[in-house]
């Protein structure tokens, strides 16, 4: 999307205003520790800009899936100890949804101040995008700023509904996301390749259909590749597949030929009898998986093939690992390709954009998460963008 079409934060007068700011603090907390702070860290420019304007900021966010009921383990209050050091600011927590009490608390604090409202998904009307709730939330501020790209594929009260009642704009992170994503899919330097991995074609069918129209090389990995190989009559042993997707997989190949998109599948495969850490494994040609074994990664020959394709390309989009990367040694191909992408990017040969939780985890395992051109903060929103869908949270901040 052309960022000229959206209202930008820097074009709004925020001086001494009360701003409803939608962020995404749905971050991973494991054993009481924040394991990935990037979604918080990347909103610092928006926070700092608004505070420099003397604004009062009311942060709205969800956390987990409480489905409209209060759950103490999903309270945003538990995140304050992580957020305050990152922002280097004090947060005033608003623990309930009593509008009069919230307004009173906001009014009695000076400009600038930083507030955090309790988990929006505790509200029954949030996920239904309830008009009355949207209006009530909107009454708390002078304007609305969305800086949660990763939640913008949801038409919820706190992402889309509020914008019906307040002047609305995009924060700096959303602007950054839209610029990076539009560059690689709407006006890329060619040739362009996409790596799409994962377990099921059914969950990424719309992504594949859209990318076939856009890219020169579509590299398919993970168990999705098993289904594609099966559709070509290849022996895939005991591998995970979606047999009901066989005809659709065949149609994808036909479609790709009509758009001059080259679908790239494994030439060789790494197989084992079980998916367990450090189990015995063997490498076979892609059409020779033994009946009792399953395909869990691509082999060295396929790695070289993919590297050669990447070397030909000027642009790469990546969503999903090539193998069962969570379990060693089936992370090898993903790590190897990630390092190659990073090297080409650092040398200025490649513009690389990646997104999705598994992809980002894989890039971290490869220690290259800072070496690609851009890593999206989004999972579902990144996928829907790859599908060519309009995102409600973005459409609502258009001029």
Image (cartoon, helix red, strand yellow):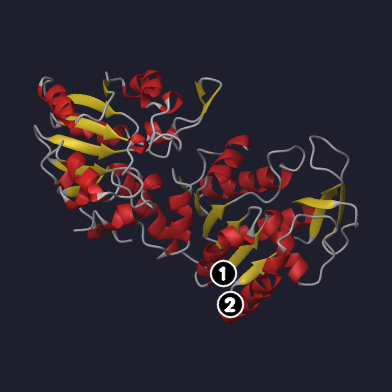
Q: Residue 242, image x and y in percent? A: 70, 61
Q: Is residue 65 above or below residue 82?
A: below
Q: Is residue 324 above or below residue 111?
A: below
- How busy is the neighbourhood of tag 2: few (under 14 within 10 Å), some, or many (20 plus)? some
Image quarter of the C terminus: bottom left
Residue assigned mark 2: 260
Q: Quadrant of residue 106?
A: top left
Image quarter of the N terminus: bottom left
Q: Residue at the spot x=87%, y=46% of the render?
A: 273
Horizontal placement of 115 versus 122: left or right? left
Q: Residue at the spot x=55%, y=53% of the render?
A: 318
Asked whether residue 8 is in view, the answer is no
Q: Residue 266, image x and y in percent? A: 75, 60
Most foreground residue, 73 or 82: 73
Horizontal placement of 332 versus 104: left or right? right
Q: Is residue 359 above or below residue 2?
A: above
Q: Residue at the spot x=38%, y=32% of the render?
A: 40
């Amino acid at each position: 999307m052309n960022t000229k079409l959206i209202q930008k934060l820097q074009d709004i007068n925020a001086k001494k205003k009360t701003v409803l700011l939608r962020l995404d603090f749905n971050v991973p907390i494991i054993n009481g520790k924040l394991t990935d702070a990037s979604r918080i860290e990347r909103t610092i420019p928006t926070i700092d800009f608004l505070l420099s304007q003397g604004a009062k900021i009311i942060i709205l966010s969800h956390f987990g899936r409480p489905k409209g009921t209060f759950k103490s383990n999903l309270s945003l209050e538990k995140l304050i100890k992580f957020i305050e050091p990152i922002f280097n600011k004090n947060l005033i927590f608003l623990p309930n949804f009593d509008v009069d009490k919230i307004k009173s608390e906001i009014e009695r604090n000076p400009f600038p101040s930083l507030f955090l409202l309790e988990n929006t998904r505790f509200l029954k009307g949030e996920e239904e995008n309830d008009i009355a709730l949207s209006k009530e939330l909107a009454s708390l501020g002078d304007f609305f700023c969305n800086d949660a790209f990763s939640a913008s594929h949801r038409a919820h009260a706190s992402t889309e509904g509020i914008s019906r009642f307040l002047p609305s704009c995009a924060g700096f992170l959303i602007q950054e996301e839209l610029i990076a994503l539009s560059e690689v899919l709407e006006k890329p330097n060619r040739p362009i390749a996409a790596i799409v991995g994962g377990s099921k074609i059914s969950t990424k069918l719309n992504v594949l259909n859209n990318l076939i129209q856009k890219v020169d090389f579509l590299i398919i990995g993970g168990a999705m590749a098993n289904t594609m190989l099966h559709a070509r009559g290849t022996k895939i042993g005991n591998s995970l597949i979606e047999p009901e997707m066989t005809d659709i997989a065949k149609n994808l190949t036909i479609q790709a030929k009509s758009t001059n998109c080259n679908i790239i599948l494994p030439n060789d495969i790494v197989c084992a009898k079980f998916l367990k850490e450090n189990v015995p494994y063997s490498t076979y040609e892609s059409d020779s998986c033994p009946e009792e074994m399953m395909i869990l990664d691509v082999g060295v020959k396929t790695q070289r093939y993919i590297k050669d394709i990447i070397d030909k390309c000027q642009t790469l989009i990546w969503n999903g690992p090539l193998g069962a990367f969570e379990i060693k040694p089936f992370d090898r191909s993903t790590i190897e390709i990630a390092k190659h992408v990073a090297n080409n990017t650092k040398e200025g040969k490649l513009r690389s954009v990646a997104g999705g939780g598994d992809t980002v985890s894989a890039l971290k395992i490869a220690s290259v998460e800072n070496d690609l051109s851009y890593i999206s903060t989004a999972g579902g929103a990144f996928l829907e963008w790859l599908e060519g869908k309009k995102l409600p949270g973005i459409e609502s901040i258009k001029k």
